[in-house]
Amino acid sequence: MLPEVLDTGLFACAMPLAASVLLFGIYSVIRTESALERSARAAFVSDQSATADAQ
């Protein structure tokens, strides 16, 4: 009986932690991707303005 109670308790503690880690991983990927997109867009805009100045 005690091993089942311990297993259930560990499972009950581990699952929310695992879900939190998974959600944080997804959030980190989305945040990094949008930051890369923002920096790429800024580089493109500055390149376009540099090209326009050169002409």
Image (cartoon, rainbow, N blue to C red):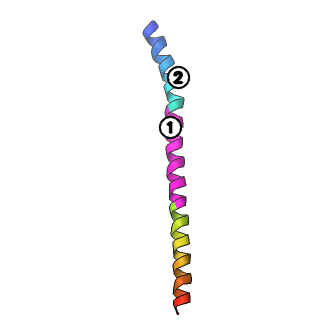
Residue in view at x 45 percent, y 12 percent: 4
Give, as a three-letter code, the residue at label 1.
Val
Residue in view at x 51 percent, y 47 percent: 26
Secondary structure beneath dot 1 equals: helix
The quarter of the picture where the N terminus appears is top left
The magenta span reads 18-35
* Above or below 3: residue 37: below
Secondary structure mostly taken by the magenta-highlighted segment of the chain: helix
Q: Which of 9 and 53 is in front in this view?
A: 53
Residue 38 horizontal/vertical position (percent): 55, 65
**Quadrant housing residue 16:** top right
What's the mark number on residue 12? 2
Residue 50 horizontal/vertical position (percent): 53, 83
Which is closer to the viewer, label 1 or label 2?
A: 1
What's the mark number on residue 21? 1
Residue in view at x 53 percent, y 53 percent: 30
Q: Tag count in the figure?
A: 2
* Above or below 30: residue 36: below
Let me know if residue 36 is in the magenta part. Answer: no
* Above or below 35: residue 23: above
* Above or below 27: residue 47: below
Give, as a three-letter code, the residue at label 2.
Ala
